[in-house]
Image (cartoon, helix red, strand yellow):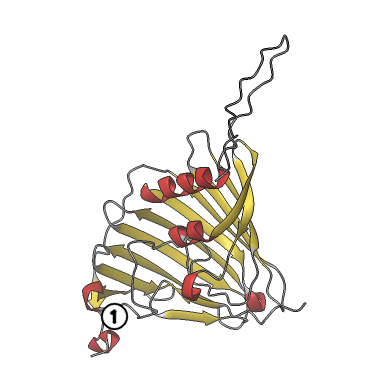
């Protein structure tokens, strides 16, 4: 059975850059009937661990802590994405640099967000542009910024359908790449791909000895074109991050605010 066409859209740094691509487990029951003791004792089965809940808890814990991350993967039309970033949810500081190479629309840029102040800069320019996020409409695709889930990790966590534990530090499973209302949340760390018509897809997640999530790898299989593999690595959980506003930045023109 042929799957419906897949639409993938990539928006870089949330502002001035744009590139388009192809389209609980049950506990053992007890009996009230007396059981005669025998010479050979029968082991009582332990409740099956809820592996999905365990993984979700690790993802949520990692999202709530300050951390650094890196993103890499292949995109439609022969493009590749590479990026790095840092996110401190408590201090409301965020920083990212993303580049898309290959294909017809290569692009690159950086963004820094501190509270309600957003600063963006294409890689080929020296000047930063400041945007007042209090003036940006919530439905603005390029200027808005979501402090609840800026990296897409929360949406990815909610999309997880099934989980198996391979070893103490490795989980595999499947997630729904379409997401609620086709909200973009992939790649984690650069949430920009909107997928439509892609079936449940596989993922592999690793953690370290402290339980922090260190790697998220997902695979998408469009109806046309090669398989897409997107990997996000995370580190420095809970450590202090130095994210400062640019020394100088020009103000965005009024038309960016729709006025």
- Residue furthest out toward the right: 1
- Residue furthest out toward the top: 39
Q: Residue at x 61, y 25 (%)?
A: 33
Residue to which mark 1 is pinned: 137
Q: Position of residue 82 (x, y in %)?
A: 54, 64
- Residue furthest out toward the front: 33
Q: Residue at x 69, y 69 (%)?
A: 221
Q: Residues within 10 Å of mark 1 (few under 14, many from 20)?
A: some
Q: Position of residue 256 (x, y in %)?
A: 29, 85
Location of the C terminus by quadrant is bottom left
Can the viewer see residue 183 in this picture?
no
Q: Position of residue 68 (x, y in %)?
A: 43, 51
Q: Residue at x 48, y 70 (%)?
A: 180
Location of the N terminus by quadrant is bottom right
Residue 236 located left or right of residue 178: left
Residue 90 located left or right of residue 193: left
Please determine whether, in this image, residue 153 is positioned above or below residue 6.
above
């Amino acid at each position: 059975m042929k799957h419906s066409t897949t639409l993938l859209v990539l928006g870089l740094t949330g502002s001035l850059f744009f590139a388009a691509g192809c389209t609980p487990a049950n506990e053992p029951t007890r009996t009230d009937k007396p059981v005669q003791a025998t010479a050979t004792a029968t082991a009582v089965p332990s409740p099956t661990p809820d592996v999905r809940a365990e993984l979700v808890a690790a993802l949520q814990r990692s999202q709530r802590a300050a951390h650094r991350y890196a993103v890499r993967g292949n995109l439609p039309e022969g493009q590749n994405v590479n990026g790095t970033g840092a996110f401190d949810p408590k201090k409301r500081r965020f920083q990212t640099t993303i580049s898309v190479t290959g294909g017809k629309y290569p692009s690159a840029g950086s963004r820094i967000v501190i509270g309600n102040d957003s600063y963006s800069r294409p890689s080929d320019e020296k000047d930063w542009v400041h945007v007042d996020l209090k003036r940006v409409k919530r439905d603005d695709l390029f200027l808005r910024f979501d402090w609840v889930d800026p990296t897409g990790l929360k949406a990815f966590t909610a999309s997880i359908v099934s989980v198996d534990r391979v070893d103490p530090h490795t989980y595999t499973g499947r997630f729904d790449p379409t997401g609620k209302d086709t909200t973009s949340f992939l790649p984690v760390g650069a949430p920009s791909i909107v997928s439509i018509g892609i079936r449940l897809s596989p993922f592999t997640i690793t953690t370290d000895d402290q339980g922090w999530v260190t790697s998220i790898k997902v695979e998408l299989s469009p109806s046309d074109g090669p398989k897409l593999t997107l990997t996000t690595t995370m580190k420095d959980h809970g450590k202090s991050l130095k994210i400062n506003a640019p020394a100088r930045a020009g103000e965005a023109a009024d038309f960016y605010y729709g006025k």
